[in-house]
Image (spheres, rainbow, N blue to C red):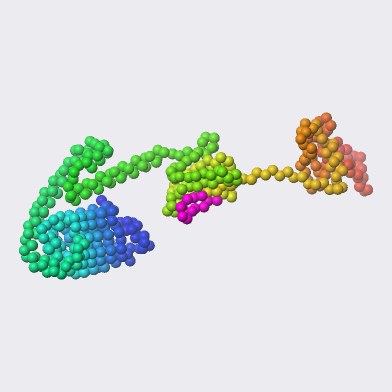
Amino acid sequence: MVRITVELVRKRAEHHDCLLAPLEEIALHQENIEKIEYLQDWCPKLKILLMQSNLIAKIENLNKLKYLSYLNLALNNIEVIENLERCESLQKLDLTLNFIGEITSVANLVNNYNLENLYLTGNPCTDYDSYRQFVVATLPQLIWLDGEEIERSYRIKALQNLPIVKPDILFEQENYRHGRRKQKARLEHEIQNKWENQYKHLDEDERNKKFWAEKCEHAPEVRYEIERMKQLKLKNLSTDTENKEEKRTYKMFASDGRPFNINQAKIDFKFDDSEPDRYILDLSVYKHLNTNLLDVDVQPNYVRVTLKGKIFQLCLPEEVDTSNSTAQRSQITGHLVITMPKPETVIKRIKKPAKKNDETHRNQLYDDHKSTDCQSHTDQSVREYLEIGPAPHYVLDFTRMTNNDEHKNMSSYINSLFLGDEKLPSSDFIDDPDVPALV
């Protein structure tokens, strides 16, 4: 049984900032509600109440709604019109496709002097002879009945024929009451017997197939049973979906760290690698999906997009520049376009020009340290060196560092490169014979 709760009412009152006290209109249709309650206390200023397509069996708890002008209770299980006398502002009442057989219960609407429009189409009482005349004569304030305007001449005729029509109406109503009592007892017994004996030994598919293949009567009990089958089916579907989601686990990466291609969201996409300097990924994101539900993560070797908790992951052929990657959303189609530029790899060789006064020294270094390995490369006419230090003559030839024939002592070789000629002592230098010489 579905009850009216504060959460349900607030959910349907989103257009009014979820405030209930000043609410003037609310739609609670197709919620499988079985009882009207709490609304007159929570929403005393209601003017329009829509509760069609539920399982309501009785009109109740609406007497405090003094401003209620339109009440829609179509497609419910109502059998008697009652408890609306104090809804003095009621102008339109829709009771289409209910089970109202008590035609005399329309007299409970006599005090609703503002009532102009009444719908009783699809109720058992509409099959009675002279039904329309009886209702028009009973409710003189009506202007429309079942969507047809009541002419003044027809109203006068109905009032004149009321004494003649009323006995026949009461007779048909009594026959309906008698048949309805028998139908209710029989259906309750049959439904209970089916669930305890027949459906008990059948699996879900066989039970559904047997139930929907059977012919049924138009009665409140049958509506309850149909709704029961729908709820069981929805419950089983949700359970199966949860089980499938629990069983399916997505692995993002292989054992060697390579990212997998995953399309859990099952959306179309286009990957453009025709341009030499970038990759472009076009995802066909749903047009009306809120952008806040999207999460884009671009990594050097893969791109991952999360849509409402579902993952789309694509492995990239080459590494991309994550800092300069962009993601844009189309306001017309809703597509998500991710542009991922490739990183620029440029090898810069640094070579500073030699000063005039150092030109002789650089040329001498180049001639002295030319190795036989360089001669094998006939296509190279000039060998470049890495310059270190602030002075131009601090040039290190790495090709001679392993040549032990010419330089047995590496320290003397480094000193010859960086220190150059032997430094002369200063004029005030005193040689101490006790200090050992440097080796």
Residue at x 27% of width, y 61% of height: 49
Q: Does residue 310 appear left or right of residue 127 in this picture?
A: right
Residue range corresponding to the magenta coloring? 326-337
- Tell me, yes or no, if residue 349 can be seen here: yes
Q: Position of residue 172 (x, y in %)?
A: 9, 56
Q: Does residue 300 appear left or right of residue 157 in this picture?
A: right
In the rendered image, the quadrant that contains the C terminus is top right
Residue at x 23% of width, y 42% of height: 212
Residue at x 82% of width, y 35% of height: 370
For residue 409, what is the image quadrant?
top right
List the single residue furthest toward the top. 405
Residue at x 6% of width, y 61% of height: 167
Q: How many labels, in total?
A: 0
Would residue 336 be counted in the magenta stretch? yes
Position of 264 relative to 156 (above/below):
above
Would residue 243 be counted in the magenta stretch? no
Q: Position of residue 128 (x, y in %)?
A: 11, 57
For residue 63, what is the image quadrant?
bottom left
